[in-house]
Amino acid sequence: MSELLASFERLLDTAGGDALMPALDVAGFLDALRELPLREIEPLLRALGRRAIDAPVAEAMAARAVPAPSRALLAVIATAEMAGIGERLLDMSIEHANTREQFGRPIGKFQAIQQQLAVMAEQVMMTRIAAQTSCAHGLEPPLAAAAVAKSAASSAAPTIAGIAHAVHGAIGITREFPLHRFTARLHALRMSHGSESYWNRLLGSARLQADAQNSLDFVRSI
Amino acid sequence: MFDALQLASIPAEDEALRPKVRALIAEHVLQRPITDRVRSWMGVDAAFSRALAEAGLLGLTVPAAYGGGGRGPFARYVVVEELLAAGAPVGLHWIADRQSALLILGFGTQAQKQLYLPRICRGEIFFCIGMSEPGAGSDLASVRSRAERTEQGWRLTGQKIWTTSAHLCDYMIALVRTSGAPGDRQQGLSQLIVDLRAPGVAIRGIEDATGHRDFNEVFFDGVELPADALLGTEGAGWAQVNAELAFERSGPERIWASAVLLDGWIAHLKRSGAGEARVERVGALTTQLAALRTLSIALTARLAAGERPLTEASLYKDLGTSFEQAIPVAIADDLGSHPDEPVAPELRAALVEALALAPTYSLRGGTREILRGIIARGLGLR
Ligand SMILES: Cc1cc2nc3c(=O)[nH]c(=O)nc-3n(C[C@H](O)[C@H](O)[C@H](O)COP(=O)(O)OP(=O)(O)OC[C@H]3O[C@@H](n4cnc5c(N)ncnc54)[C@H](O)[C@@H]3O)c2cc1C
């Protein structure tokens, strides 16, 4: 883990609530995107997701780096946060499956639970690679690249949130247990800056207008 | 767990292979009907396989000393994605190129490597996979075919099933029992290279739902094989077959099976017109394809680094085959939702073919449920 990420995470874990934004500002993190490429900030965005931070940290970073961040950029940034949320939800779900016992054994020993968690891991992996790919485009991502990323992440979100809740059972919807914060944030980000259908329409019309020889040519051009 | 999966791109020298492959595709593939091209993996064309070999595009990852290209996984990646995206008939050389050659390279003796590899790279001999038996599907360790030692080598008795292209192949790499009893499970298994023309081998085609005879039953009735039919170490068959399955599962090819149908449908939409729902559907499939392709490139980079990312490969195969299966389902709904619109008969026929083929994508090479079990183990649940 990089030094930058480590100090960012330390700050996230100590400064809570209203103190967070000012603390990040003083430490220079809100200017991070002005100084470093988005590709290198992507792990920080995931770190926000892993904590389900509601404050608009990522948006503030973008606004400092470009005068009027495009919807494509905001969608890419949201994708990275969603990847972080997905990682955390998967970890929580595996942890719960290995500790919660029913019928005399951890529920993670039941094949039905295992198969659901495998599906969840697939969707988290998709979100993760979508985040990394799109963040590599920097602060002016092409529309098509943003479309691929945000569509993949937003399509994955309901499956990820749904399985996390299914595996946790009733405890997962209590106010006290933190799961709902992550799934609510994931659902919110799914809608922000264009849900999957928004981006699918955009990419679909690009595909239908392109004179690519085949789908391989088209996706290679994104 | 996904930290090791890093964004990667295809090296320029491998990208440079595309024009060569495309020239062959233009010459041999594009004029074939789309009903034919949706069957890419099952497509058989010896002249095409040989043309690929002559162009140096078979056995790309086999060392040059054995007649191969001596290149890394990305060279094969580029060639394979071009071939599959165009629906080229790759069935004949497919297994040898993807797994048998690597297996022989990894476990064979010097003599075996010299005997088989150059001919594989020249497109002269073809291999099939002898794993499944009537009683051994997902539970592969329960194979019953048995080879006994003789003075000259081995005597093989038993049966394989679902052996794709056995009737067209020269050799099978078979997983058989060489000691102990079926109850011993993973112990006592070995891999043999079986000459399919040896006396006592009988091959009977099995007709599939679409009327094709791609897979077979293969019977061994006291087949006498030489001592050097043994591949690798006697008794190490289980470990070897798992290495072979890793080659089979981690390839880049898990997203293209329905691509020809997808492109046929997109051409149809360009002619017939597409409202919002259709545009959105095209976008949904295309975004998935693009995201999956980056995933497959990231995975291939791990292979190129000499790693064996078993869990990630299983995650990818399950995602990829689900996507391949979703395409015909989506297209059927779309065409059915425009009942008054004329559809070219060959697009309709290709759709019927693809719907019939799609279930196999998540069966061969290990079923969806078995893959998810492997993933669960990787996640620390088993
Ligand atoms: C087109 C095609 C080509 C093939 N080509 C070859 C070939 O060339 N060579 C070769 O050796 N084989 C080949 N196969 C066979 C293939 O490997 C097997 O079909 C596969 O391993 C599954 O075995 P089975 O069909 O006997 O199904 P089964 O093992 O009977 O499975 C049936 C169902 O039960 C499920 N199941 C089984 N065990 C478990 C478990 N422990 N937990 C949960 N669910 C379980 C499966 O997931 C599946 O849903 C081919 C298959 C197809 C469809």
Image: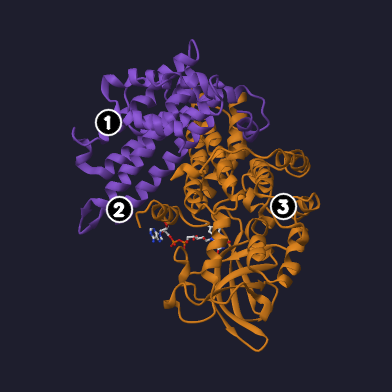
Position above or below: B374 against B228: above
Measured Cα–Cα span from mark 2 to mark 1: 23 Å
Give the numbered dot on residue A91.
none
Drawing shade for chain B? orange
* Residue ID for mark 3: B60
Is A214 displayed left or right of A154 in the figure? Answer: right
Q: Where is residue B375 shown, x and y percent of the image?
A: 42, 52
* Tag 3 and tag 2 share a subunit: no
What quarter of the picture does the N terminus of chain B occupy? top left
Q: Nearer the viewer, mark 1 or mark 3?
A: 1
Q: Nearer the viewer, residue B105 or A4?
A: A4
Q: Chain of mark 1?
A: A
Q: Residues within 10 Å of mark 3 (few under 14, many from 20)?
A: many
Type of amino acid under label 2: Gly
Per the image, label 2 sits on a secondary structure element best described as helix
The three-letter code of the residue at mark 3 reads Leu
The disc at residue A181 is: 1
Chain A tint in image? purple
Element under disc 1: helix
Q: Are marks 1 and 3 in contact (CB under 8 Å)?
A: no
Tell me whether circle 3 and circle 2 mark residues in contact (CB < 8 Å).
Answer: no
* In front of the other: B61 or A216: B61
Q: Are marks 1 and 3 on the same chain?
A: no
